[in-house]
Amino acid sequence: MASLQIPCATPTSQSRSSPHPLFAKPSHFLTHAKRRSNRLRVSATAGQNQSNSSQNVETAQGRVDRRNVLLGLGGGLYGAANLISSPGASANPVQPPELDKCGTATNLNTGEQLDINCCPPVTDRILDYRLPPVYQLKVRPSAHRVSPEYIAKYNKAIDLMKRLPADDPRNFMQQAMIHCAYCNGAYDQPGQGSLDLQIHNSWLFFPFHRWYLYFYERILAKLIGDPTFALPFWNWDNPKGMTIPPMFNDTKAAIYDPKRNQDRLTAVVDLGMTGNTDPLQLVANNLTIMYSEMIRGNADVYDFMGQPYREGTAVNPGPGSSERGSHTAIHVFVGDPREPSGEDLGNFYSAGRDPLFYCHHANVDRMWTLWQYFLPSNKVPDKRITDPDFLNASFVFYDENAQLVRVTVKDSLDNLRMGYDFERVDLPWIDYRPPPQTVKAKIVRTGTTAPKADTLFPLKLEKVVRFQVPKAKKGKADELLVLENITVDTTKFLKFDVFVNDEDDNAFELDKAAYAGTYAQVPHKSKNKTATTSIRLKLTDLYDDMDIGDDDTIVVTLVPRHQGPGVTIGGIKVIENPPAKSSS
Ligand code: C2O
């Protein structure tokens, strides 16, 4: 089977929400209208943030009302049956930043202050945002498939956004600065001393960006007076979308940005960041990576979403598979090497200045939806996070009326409730499991000379290293490889790949059973240059495909894709899935 057969939307659901007139046949769009069409009715909440009622108003300095937490969200509402025990003790959800305490973002390479101020306008009026009723779903189109009319409309909207007064929070640069403010150490976590507020590399990654795009899209729609306007998604997970969408290469267009890697304007994207330039191999690598980060490598919801980040958590508790993989790769692929810090897309502080950022992130957002609702759920015991510190985490954004609103993670969990869906396209990676290796790897057959892991760690990763790690259990096993206490220099682009029992050193090819997964990050500045993180890679399918069942030991190869030092890995081990209670 080449692609997932998504059940077609029913006529009923289609008639509830007529598709965008610009795109093809109705039955093609809605990725999951049938599945949840009944839920659309639920979302009708009246009086969306137009109210001035005093309980909605708080000052910019105000803290979030904790009553939500007290009123049951922390208590028995989430029964034990639903609860996935999440790593780390429960604390409090991350609070929105205090807008009047916004510092200057810092430049990566020089450590000097950036000459831009990321701080959004300060206001003393914040409303709690309520999702408006959905009368008609917006459909985000695949950026490679849009019509000339759509492109004209999109450019007009971006142009109008650029022409707004510079201090209007909806202005193009103001919107770009939101990303800088939340991602470059401009804010501290309220009440947590000088601990940075940083929404990347954690479970806040998907919800934050979803809300960011949500308001961005609404601002654009309002500017052109078309409430059906929806952002395009860069379909980089499909071979037909594996180049920069052509509309972004029109140098006269409002969506053009000169700060992009000029060698890559029409090149096939390199989600593996291997540097390979053979387009066919790149496509194979890309599909393998998608399969690995969406399906094969994840044992639980945190492996995909990212690790818990609560009030008081230090930055970078651990990025999810999609964030660190394809997401990072596109940033780095497009960022301009002529610029000191890979601007615009190659660095968090400047990424939002390129309209392509929002198109990229629309696809990142689509990955979340696909993962939630379309991927085989037998691989991950529960795809929901019911932890109140996740659900009640909140952010602030300016909405399409330039009103500052506070939003919560729990309101972002369902894109249909938020009023948009994605054009339906094939998912060619859904079955892209690497072929089994029929002959047992020679390094294992003849006995490996690789050193034992415990003689090497902590390991400063500067070159390819290969070593042995004992399996947790002999025989057929459901196991995870854990790389812990990974200390990273956050200001650098860093990436390494992990292979198991790989005997050829052709690290340009990822479409093989031995490829276990990736760590990668987009450069960004935090107050401390380093952060400590960890990743887990599920090995169960890999064991099957490599016929490893009867071995006691695996041979792990780590392949760094970056120059120079920047990563130190504290330890590595294989654990059972789910982890035994005694192991952390
Ligand atoms: Cu907030 Cu792709 O980054």
Image: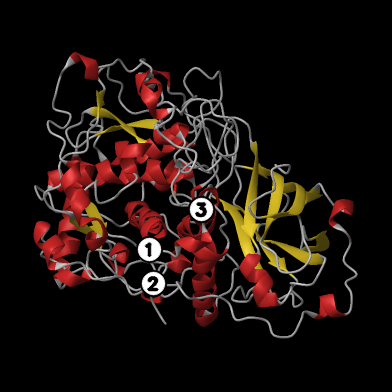
Q: Secondary structure at mark 3?
A: helix
Give the image quarter of residue 369.
bottom left
User: What coloring was used for the rendering?
Assistant: secondary structure
Residue at (34% x, 45% y) in the render: 413
Q: Position of residue 503 (x, y in %)?
A: 77, 76
Q: What residue type is disc 1 on? A: Phe
In primary-sequence order, the first of circles 2 and 1 is 1
Residue position for label 3: 304
Q: Secondary structure at mark 1?
A: loop
- Tell me if label 2 and label 1 are in contact, CB under 8 Å: yes
Give the image quarter of residue 14.
bottom left
In this rendering, the answer to whether 583 lies above or below 22 is above
Q: Position of residue 358 (x, y in %)?
A: 33, 52
Q: Secondary structure at mark 2?
A: loop
Depth order, front residue of 552/413: 552
Image quarter hosting the C terminus: top right
Q: Which mark is residue 301?
A: none
How far is disc 3 from disc 1 in space, using C-alphas? 14 Å
Residue position for label 2: 427
Image quarter hosting the N terminus: bottom left
Q: What residue type is disc 2 on? A: Leu
Residue position for label 1: 374
Give the image quarter of residue 463.
bottom right
How far is disc 3 from disc 2 in space, using C-alphas? 18 Å
In primary-sequence order, the first of circles 3 and 1 is 3
Q: What residue type is disc 3 on? A: Phe
